Image (cartoon, helix red, strand yellow):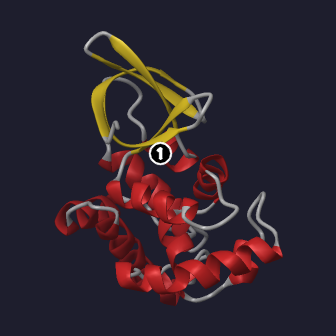
Amino acid sequence: MIASLQGTIAYRSIDHVIVEVGGIGYRLLIPLSTFYALPESGAARFQVYTHVREDAILLFGFLSSAEKDLFVLLISVSGIGPKLALNILSHIPAPVLLAALAEGDAKRLATLPGIGKKTAERLVLELREKVHKLGVPPAHAAPLSPAATATSLEDALSALVNLGYKEAQARKVLDAMEVTTDSGLEEVLKGALKVLVR
């Protein structure tokens, strides 16, 4: 089983990358969150989930072990396969997804492509307690108000630390960002991740 890969990015697209390691190119299926955080070129290290089927061996790549762990949690739910789990992670930031699961917000989950009401309820039922054990950072997707800006930056900081980044490093990046009252948590996280993985 391949658990991680470190190599040179030979090709990148919105749904997969090819990473060359020792002259061999590995095709990794990735969520949009990983794509947005990828360096333009050069070396990168991926946490990998190996999925074996009768007709294929698929590799799923993530830039953080926390996102990989969340992927593994998702596919443990009946009816959620690897590609649907990847689709979920592509349409909602991991911290926001964790918060929705912890709060039992099935309505929010049902807005994701490929997730209906029953599947959303099943996700909450099966993962709510498991997510609580992970230690969920506060997160929300609402636009920032002037009074909430400082709190929202702290939410983003908590989310980045939960994804495996050092607090001092994450705080430095967030402090350097231009955050307006129209900036949502998802936008702030996306911008911070682009800087942190360089």
Extreme-top residue of the structure? 23
Tell me if 36 is positioned left or right of 69 in this view.
right
Tell me if 115 is positioned left or right of 4 in this view.
right
Rendered position, 33 above or below 88 = above
Secondary structure under badge 1? helix
Q: Position of residue 51 (x, y in %)?
A: 50, 41
Q: Residue at x 63, y 81 (%)?
A: 124
Q: Nearer the viewer, residue 66 or 3?
A: 3
Given the image, on which type of amino acid does mark 1 rest? Thr
Q: Residue at x 33, y 55 (%)?
A: 65
User: The N terminus appears in which quarter of the rendering?
Assistant: top left
Rendered position, 59 above or below 129 = above
Residue 119's quadrant in the figure? bottom right
Q: Which residue is mark 1?
A: 34
Q: Is residue 135 visible?
A: no
Q: Position of residue 193 (x, y in %)?
A: 39, 52
Q: Residue at x 53, y 84 (%)?
A: 128
Question: Which class describes the residues within 10 Å of circle 1: few (<14), some (14-19), or many (20+)?
Answer: many
Q: Nearer the viewer, residue 190 or 146?
A: 190
User: The C terminus appears in which quarter of the rendering?
Assistant: top left
